[in-house]
Image (cartoon, rainbow, N blue to C red):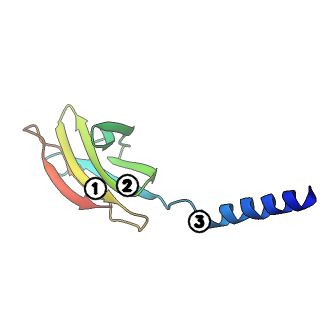
Amino acid sequence: MRLLLSVMFVCLTAVGFTQGPPPATGVITGVVADSSGGSVSGALVALRNGSRLLKTTTTDTAGSFRFAQVEPGAYQVSASSPLGSASVAVTVSSAPAAPLRLVLTRSARTDQAATA
């Protein structure tokens, strides 16, 4: 019985070590601006993976937003307010990335590409 328990302990311990650390996450930060370059506070910012809405936030008084603990992968970040809307494709990795800048327009959605 002791031998069986010892073998089970060794097997379970080995499985735990082979799984490795959890995947690193990234952060998406940015600023939402109007067409004249001014910051837009209170804009709704959404993070999507395909058609699936993952997170939302609103910009602060400086027009800034932040999504933390984002798994590596491809995403769409969109912003909207009464002043217009903007959208950007983002690839997230565990490496630090430059902040995004989304400029709101009243016309059809503006697509940009970026890496975060």
Mark sitting earlier along the chain (1/2): 2
The image position of residue 98, as x and y in percent, is 32, 65
With 27 as the anchor, is 38 left or right in this view? Answer: left
Q: Amino acid at mark 1?
A: Val
Q: Marks 3 and 2, how far apart in space?
A: 25 Å
In percent of the image, x 36 and y 43: which residue is there? Answer: 61
Q: Residue at x 62, y 66 (%)?
A: 18
Residue 12 x %, y %: 73, 59
Name the residue beneath numbered marker 1: 90
Position of 51 relative to 70 (above/below)? above
Can residue 42 be spotted in the picture? no
Out of 59 and 69, give the one closest to the viewer. Answer: 69
- Compute the Cα span from label 1 to label 2: 9 Å
Q: Earlier in the sequence, mark 1 or mark 3?
A: 3
Q: Are marks 1 and 2 in contact (CB under 8 Å)?
A: yes
Quick one: SS at disc 1? strand
| Residue drawn at x 47%, y 58% as measured from the top left | 25
- Report, in whole angstroms, how far the alpha carbon at label 1 lies from the one at label 3: 27 Å
- The mark lying in front, picked from 3 and 2, is 3
In x, y percent, where is residue 112? Answer: 16, 54
Q: Which residue is mark 3?
A: 20
Residue 80 visible somewhere in the drawing: yes
Amino acid at pointer 2: Ile
Which residue is disc 2 drawn over? Answer: 28
Q: Please name the residue shown 17% across and 43% down the image.
A: 104
Q: Residues within 10 Å of mark 3 (few under 14, many from 20)?
A: few
